[in-house]
Amino acid sequence: MDGNAAHVFVGPYDFCDLAEQLANSRYYKAVLGVRLVATSLGALMCAFLLRSKVSWIFVHGYDIVGDHKMNTIILHVHARILLKYHIIVSLLLAVNYFAITVFEIVRTMRDVHYCDHLMPRWLSFWPHFVTGNLVYCQTFSSFFIIVERLLCTFRIRTYELLDLRKPLLLFLAIMTGSIIFISYFMLVRTASWEMSLFYLAFEDPGNMEYGTAYMFAHISVDFFSMIICKVVHVLNRRAKKVFLQKTVFLKKQLGSQLSSKLQIRQNIALSSTLMPVVFFHFVISAGSALVISLFALTNWKNDLVTTILVAESFAVFPLYSIIMPAVFHCSHRTLTLGWTESFFVTRGSKVGSVTDGKSKEFERFFKMFDEMMENARSRS
């Protein structure tokens, strides 16, 4: 880094001039304001979803035996762990992006010389480094939720008996550590550590290979997640139809196992919810990263300020932290009711409401049992 009283150069770039243009840009301030609102709302909604009974999937319709309604499904322990990991990563991503936005706003509003807007190395690199890692953890956790449901579909008769929570937690820890290690190994060679948006500085000519590999992996994982999610949904819809038709194949393969029926209901409920979630993640995360990378790779030498403004405009990763909880709450509105009850109802009335709810559940199941017995007598 070379500097004098009015200029600070990092390579060919005058960072004082860059800071002045960004600080005087009304568009940049508007983008930061919108991002501040989006990140705070996303963090709040992810916290609400994590606080709610996300382990329960609430569905409406007839059970696969075709005779009665069943509104509540408790997810398998593997699905609960992966889903909560995904929500926690989304929450951390929103909080980290909120912190970056607040720091950017404070930095550009300080009444100091523009050269003093230059960020320290640890503040320049690490928050954006954390963001990149969390986006990848979010992508892979979404993928493995779908893969877990696919494995459940293939082992529908015995999957309910599996309890591999400790190996699964170890796998998530190894996956997170591997993503951090690979990201650091790739970025530390190419990033300009003094620049706030480090991923726009390509000092190494080989960065094109790193950028291409990053984008290919990102888009491929999201794309395969959508395909596998659709496959899981179709397979379980057909399995449900087989149960309703009571074919000879069904009796030989699945019999009348309650576990198989419950797993099919879990798969249908979760896959129907995850399909729009995975689609929005693909559009928001992979799409925005593709636009940012392509524009940065082609235009950063010509106009660095425009490249930064475009990157900030298309960095819409926090929107997923809003859309994902919104999809869950719209698909299963009892999640929202359960959260509001747990937060706003007093302890005494809460105990009473829970007791009343349990008694109503018992009455509903007794009524359901009577209806099933009557149907069985009429068929015989």
Image (cartoon, rainbow, N blue to C red):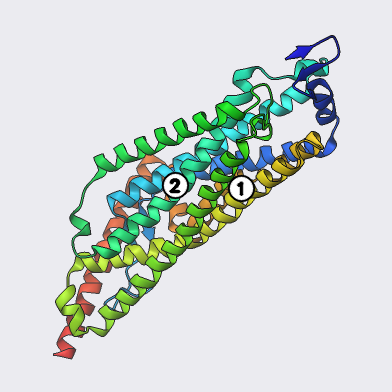
Category of crowding for the residue at label 2, using alpha-carbon neighbours closer than 10 angstroms: few (below 14), some (14–19), many (at least 20): many
Res 329 visible: no
Res 370 visible: yes
Question: Of residues 270 and 174, which is closer to you in this image?
Answer: 174
Q: Looking at the picture, does residue 216 appear above or below residue 254?
A: above
Q: Position of residue 110 (x, y in %)?
A: 78, 19
* Circle 2 residue: 140
Mark 1: secondary structure: helix
- Kind of residue sitting beneath label 2: Phe
Which corner quadrant of the image does residue 301 belong to? top right
Answer with left or right where residue 279 lies relative to residue 227: right
The residue depicted at 57 percent of the width and 32 percent of the height is 96
Q: Position of residue 334 (x, y in %)?
A: 43, 57
Answer with left or right where residue 297 lies relative to residue 233: right
Q: Quadrant of the N terminus?
A: top right
Q: Which mark is residue 87?
A: none
Q: Position of residue 256 (x, y in %)?
A: 17, 74
Q: Which mark is residue 319?
A: 1
Question: Of residues 79 and 328, which is closer to you in this image?
Answer: 79
